Image (tube, rainbow, N blue to C red):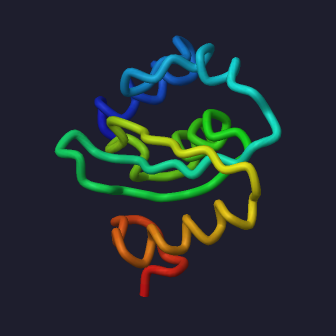
């Protein structure tokens, strides 16, 4: 792990801030809806597309487990009332936008 990656992980775990994302603001979002999230690097290249009922928690999991997490610079989210609609939107986004690190639907 590079020094930059270590600093990014420490910022997430200790400060609760990563790539300009303030975790407290994310935690206050209403529950019960599914979010589609897109993770981008500094040059706005799409790294990953996913869905979650708690995108902030899922992003923290990516930071802890994925070697590419240090590349994340910004996050965009879309909210869906129904999970099945979010699943369809995720599959469509992966197929058409071709994120760097998605494997499912990206073949």
Q: Position of residue 5 (x, y in %)?
A: 36, 35
Figure quadrant of the C terminus:
bottom left
Q: Is residue 13 left or right of residue 52?
A: left
Picture quadrant where residue 3 is located: top left
Closer-to-camera residue (4/37): 37
Q: Position of residue 72 (x, y in %)?
A: 36, 41
Figure quadrant of the N terminus:
top left
Numbered circles on residues, count: 0
Q: Residue at x 61, y 24 (%)?
A: 26
Q: Is residue 69 above or below residue 50?
A: above
Q: Position of residue 36 (x, y in %)?
A: 57, 52
Closer-to-camera residue (84/7): 84
Which residue reaches farthest front? 81
Which residue reaches farthest right? 32
Q: Residue at x 45, y 71 (%)?
A: 94
Q: Residue at x 32, y 56 (%)?
A: 46
Q: Is residue 16 above or below residue 46?
A: above
Q: Is residue 1 left or right of residue 79?
A: left
Picture quadrant where residue 42 is located: top left
Q: Position of residue 80 (x, y in %)?
A: 66, 50
Q: Residue at x 61, y 71 (%)?
A: 88
Q: Is residue 59 left or right of residue 93?
A: right
Which residue reaches farthest bottom? 107
């Amino acid at each position: 792990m590079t020094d930059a990656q270590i600093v990014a992980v420490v910022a997430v775990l200790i400060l609760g801030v990563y790539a300009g994302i303030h975790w407290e603001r994310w935690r206050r979002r209403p529950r019960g809806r599914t979010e589609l999230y897109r993770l981008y690097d500094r040059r706005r290249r799409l790294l990953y597309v996913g869905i979650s009922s708690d995108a902030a928690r899922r992003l923290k999991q990516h930071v802890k487990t994925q070697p590419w997490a240090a590349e994340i610079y910004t996050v965009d989210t879309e909210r869906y009332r129904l999970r099945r609609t979010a699943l369809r939107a995720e599959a469509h986004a992966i197929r058409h936008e071709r994120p760097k690190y998605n494997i499912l639907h990206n073949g």
